Image (spheres, rainbow, N blue to C red):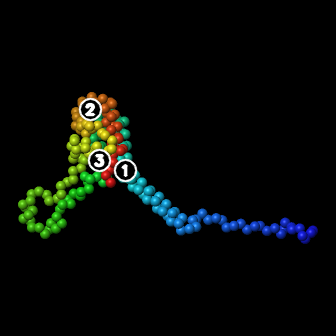
Amino acid sequence: MNPAVPSIDQLKEMALPAPVSYAPQTWGWWALLTLLVLSLLLVSARRYRQWRRDRYRREALARLAELQQRSNDLNALRELPELLKRVALSMPSSNWNAFPVGAGLPAKASCQSTSILNVMASSRASPLPQGPAALGNKDWQAFLQRHISQPLPADFSQQLSLLAYAPDATLRAMPNEQRQLLFSTCKTWVERHHVAA
């Protein structure tokens, strides 16, 4: 065997370079990654909070779908105004429920003499806030219209009053198209009403 010719035994395996790391190499990439993760957490937390806040809306829409399936039942029609009032009362951050009851009570009532209490017959507490449950026809219509961007029928609150208080014969005589229109208007309001932030 010729010593000048290399043998296969003399071959050595070449050393491979170190694997490339997927971790960012500079602080700028770490800062960008941190900012991206924080943004993702913030958006996720906000969506979760919105999802929880809209629970009343999802429940109302489910109940409304049940009522619409029984649109020929008088009890289903009579429940529509109550359902809208309950949705209005469940709306978070409304102006009408921002004032706590009794906020006007004096801070040091124990220091006052009892003779003042005998003179004043009315309560010294703040008046109860007037919510949607206490609104009448025109005020109720204005409340409903104020919380949705698209126009409602001009007599929508009157139609709801009719559903709540009309005799059974009047509700039975109501055409099916009018019933379906009421259900669709209620559904639109529940789906699209906006809440003051």
Q: Secondary structure at mark 1?
A: loop
Q: Earlier in the sequence, mark 3 or mark 1?
A: 1
Q: Quadrant of the C terminus?
A: bottom left
Residue 171's disc is 2
Q: Secondary structure at mark 3?
A: helix
- Seen in the image, is 37 located left or right of residue 15? left
Q: CA distance from mark 3 to mark 1?
A: 12 Å
Amino acid type, mark 2: Leu
Q: Label 1 near label 3: C-beta < 8 Å?
A: no
Viewer-side label of 2, 3: 3
Q: Is residue 86 visible?
A: no
Q: Secondary structure at mark 2?
A: helix
Position above or below: 11 against 166 = below
- Seen in the image, is 166 located left or right of residue 191? left
Circle 1 is placed at which residue position?
Answer: 54
Viewer-side label of 1, 2: 1
Circle 3 is placed at which residue position?
Answer: 88
Amino acid type, mark 1: Asp
Occupied quadrant, residue 191: top left
Foreground pick, 45 / 72: 45
What count of labels does the image hold?
Answer: 3
Q: Quadrant of the N terminus?
A: bottom right
Q: Earlier in the sequence, mark 2 or mark 3?
A: 3
Amino acid type, mark 3: Ala
Q: Earlier in the sequence, mark 1 or mark 2?
A: 1
- Seen in the image, is 102 located left or right of residue 46? left
Foreground pick, 124 / 143: 143
Foreground pick, 175 / 5: 5
Q: Mark 3, residues whose alpha carbon is within 10 Å: few (<14), some, or many (≥20)?
A: many
Q: CA distance from mark 2 to mark 3?
A: 24 Å
Position above or below: 189 against 73 = below
